[in-house]
Image (spheres, grey):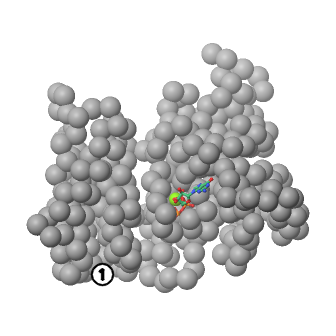
């Protein structure tokens, strides 16, 4: 197998950054499949999601992380931030993501988390939004003055610009070694986890204001049947009034949420899906360490 040839490199790469800079979009684009959910709202990602990219020369195991933020308190946000900090300890290379021409206090906080004992590469994302490309060079210079990044690479995760260069660059900083995962694999996440996430993504995309932040999803049953997968999921909310909004008039909202999620699941799994979704109230779930644990969040 050529993958174990001399000079092959492999390792873990943490994708970190403040919320909404495009970390999950980048992971999906790098791996070539949607394994991490994406929405226009900050703080969409709540779990570490691993995506595997195997090339002729290297295997990069990306770990997508929640956007690091300190504006909101609460047990959930503390748990998310802890998981970012833990991930940084566990990886070989850090890939920090920022938005082109923006380097704000949130980005500086993330810089403060970087470990000086291992390489950090900066991806400047969303360059497709920069009309005057002449502004990029001074921005790169400014970023370089902020931290001793090993490399700085401009990209557009959405358009797929600069990604080959990024992959080759990261590869050079990984230790030599055989692949850590089967080269055919794209993620180690279970279908059950991915199903819960796809449903959660629809909550982020279809519910207004603060509501997505008051919701979480648990898949209670995931059954492989002959020609279909049977999935039973529960959307947890904080209060009765939120439950009514998620369900909507005559159940229309919930129907839309479930039907979009089902289509995504069918696309990802390549089979028919029967999806049954219930909405339940669990008062204060997002600010209760014990409840978070029972809902599948790492402590
Ligand atoms: N124009 C443009 N938009 C992008 C690009 N990459 C991501 N986006 C958009 O930015 C928004 C946030 O993307 P995500 O991938 O969810 O960002 P994230 O950093 O994972 O966010 P959190 O998980 O909330 O921390 C979405 O609306 C994406 O479509 C890009 O290269 N160009
Ligand atoms: Mg994300």
Residue 223 screen position, x and y as percent: 20, 40
Viewer can see residue 282: no
Comparing 89 with 142, the one in front is 142
Q: Please give the name of the residue rendered at 48% of the width and 67% of the height, measured from the top-left corner.
A: 41
Looking at the picture, does residue 246 appear above or below residue 233?
below
The residue at which mark 1 appears reads as 284
Q: Please give the name of the residue rendered at 42% of the width and 44% of the height, measured from the top-left corner.
A: 189
Q: Is residue 68 left or right of residue 263?
A: right
Looking at the picture, does residue 231 appear above or below residue 77?
above
In the rendered picture of this protein, how many numbered marks are placed on residues? 1
Comparing 154 with 118, the one in front is 154
Location of the N terminus (image quadrant): top right
Residue furthest out toward the front: 131
Comparing 120 with 130, the one in front is 130
Viewer can see residue 102: yes
Location of the C terminus (image quadrant): bottom left
């Amino acid at each position: 197998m050529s993958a174990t040839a001399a000079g092959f490199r492999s390792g873990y790469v943490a994708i970190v950054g403040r919320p909404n800079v495009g970390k999950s979009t980048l992971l999906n684009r790098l791996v070539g499949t949607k394994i991490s959910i994406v929405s226009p709202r900050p703080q969409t990602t709540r779990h570490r999601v691993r995506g595997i990219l195997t090339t002729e020369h290297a295997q990069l195991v990306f770990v997508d992380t929640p956007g690091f933020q300190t504006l909101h308190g609460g047990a959930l946000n503390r748990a998310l931030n802890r998981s970012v900090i833990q991930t940084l300890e566990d990886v070989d290379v850090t890939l920090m993501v920022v938005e082109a021409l923006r380097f704000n206090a949130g980005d500086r906080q993330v810089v403060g988390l970087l470990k000086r004992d291992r390489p950090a590469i900066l991806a400047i994302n969303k360059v497709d939004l920069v009309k005057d490309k002449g502004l990029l060079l001074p921005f790169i210079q400014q970023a370089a003055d902020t931290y001793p990044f090993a490399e700085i690479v401009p990209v557009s995760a959405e358009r797929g610009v600069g990604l080959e260069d990024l992959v080759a660059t990261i590869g050079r900083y990984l230790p030599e070694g055989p692949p850590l995962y089967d080269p055919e694999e794209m993620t180690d996440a279970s279908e059950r986890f991915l199903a819960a996430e796809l449903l959660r993504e629809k909550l982020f995309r279809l519910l207004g204001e603060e509501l997505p932040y008051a919701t979480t999803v648990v898949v209670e049953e995931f059954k492989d049947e002959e020609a279909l997968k049977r999935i039973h999921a529960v959307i947890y909310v904080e209060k009765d009034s939120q439950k009514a909004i998620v369900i909507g008039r005559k159940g229309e909202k919930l129907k839309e949420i479930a039907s979009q999620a089902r289509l995504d699941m069918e696309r990802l799994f390549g089979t028919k899906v029967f999806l049954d979704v219930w909405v339940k109230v669990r008062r204060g779930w997002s600010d209760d360490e014990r409840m978070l644990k029972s809902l599948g969040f790492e402590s």
